[in-house]
Image (cartoon, grey):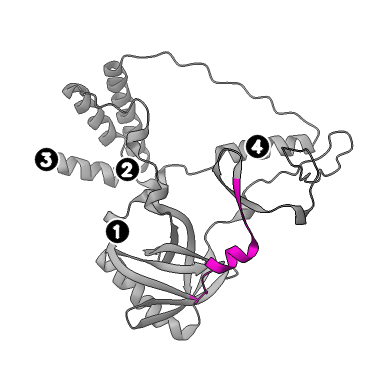
Amino acid sequence: MRSIWKGHIRFSLVTIPVRLYSAIDPAESIKFNQVHRSCNGPVGYDKRCKKCNQVLSTQDIVKGFQYEPEQYVIIEPEDFAKVRLESTKIVDIEGFISAADMDPMLYESPYFVGPDGAVAANTYSLFYEALRDSGKVGVGRVVLRDREDMVSISPHDGGLVLYKLRYPGEIRSMRDVPEMKTQSVDTEQLKLARNLLDTMTKPLVEIELRDRYDDALREIIDAKIRGKEVITVGEEPQPIVDIMKALKQSIEQAKTQRHRMIKATGKEPAEAKASKGRKRA
C-alpha cells in the first residue's frame, strides 16, 4: 500500500510522524469507456460551448461563478493562488469530543493513518490506545492539495482512521424533506415492531455486505466476452399487506430462522441473549 501524504499529527506539544493511505480500493469498482458502436474506437471529450456551440481549446476555458442567471464572475488561476493555503504537513487537532457526539452526516472520505517509521510507532500506539479507552475522537484541520479540510481522527481495528469532514453548512435539514409530519403511532403496532427488531437482531458479521449489483454486472460482462447473454427475471410486485398482519408474520418468520440457526450451530446469537437479558431486567 503506497502512502499519499506524509506529515505529523499535532495536539498541544505532542507530535506524531504519520503517513496517510487511501482506505478505498478504486480497483474494485467497474469502469467503462465511451466507444464508437460501429468501430469500437474510443470517444474523445468534445469541449463545446453550450451557448455559441464553438469547440473550445483548454486555453479558452475558465472558471466562472454564477451569481445571477447567465451572469458569471470569472476567477483566474492567480485569484485561486491568493487564497491558497500553505501546506504545513500537519494535522492540527483542535480538540477531542465524545465519539457519540460526532454526527455521521459529517463524515466524508476515509484514510488510514499509519506511523511514519519505527520511531513514531510507540507514540502512535499510545495515541491509539488513549483514543480507544476514552471513547473520544480528535477533530482538527489539515491542508491537502492547497485546500484546508476539517478532519477527524478515530481508532479503528488496531490503528487510526482520518476522515475528511463536511462542514455543517453543507448539510441540508431533515425538516426540508416533504411529508415529514409528526404522526401518532399505535402502541400495539410499536410493541410488535420492537419485538420484530429484537427477533431480527444479529451481529454485523452475519449480514452479507456484498455489492450484488457489481457481481451481476461482472456476470453480464463475462457472458458477453464469452459470446453469451444473461437472461434475468424481474421481481413480481408485492401486494400491500396490513401492517399488523405483516409484523406478526415477520416475527414468526424471524423466530423460525433463528431456531434453525440455533439447531445448526448449537448456540444462540449474542445479541439475542442480550435482548432477553434486558427484558428480564
In this picture, residue 175 sits left or right of residue 236: left
For the residues labelled 3 and 2, the Cα–Cα distance comes to 23 Å
For the residues labelled 3 and 4, the Cα–Cα distance comes to 48 Å
Image coordinates of residue 105 in percent, x first then y, are 38, 48
Question: Which stretch did the figure color magenta?
Answer: 72-89
Packing grade of label 4 (10 A; few <14, some 14-19, many >=20) is: few
Question: Mark 4 highlights which residue?
Answer: 217
> Which of labels 2 and 4 is toward the front?
4
Residue lying furthest bottom: 119
Residue lying furthest left: 281
Question: Mark 3 highlights which residue?
Answer: 280
> Which of labels 1 and 3 is toward the front?
1
Specify the amino acid type for callout 2: Gly
First in sequence, mark 3 or 2: give its number: 2
First in sequence, mark 2 or 1: give its number: 1
Q: Nearer the viewer, residue 73 or 40?
A: 73
In this picture, residue 84 sits left or right of residue 34: left
Residue 146 seen in the current view: no
Specify the amino acid type for callout 3: Arg
Question: Mark 1 highlights which residue?
Answer: 99
Q: Quadrant of residue 125?
A: bottom left
> Which of labels 3 and 2 is toward the front?
3
Q: For the C terminus, which image quadrant?
A: top left
Image coordinates of residue 34 in percent, x first then y, are 77, 41
First in sequence, mark 3 or 4: give its number: 4
In this picture, residue 70 sits left or right of residue 113: right
Specify the amino acid type for callout 4: Leu
Secondary structure, mark 2, is loop
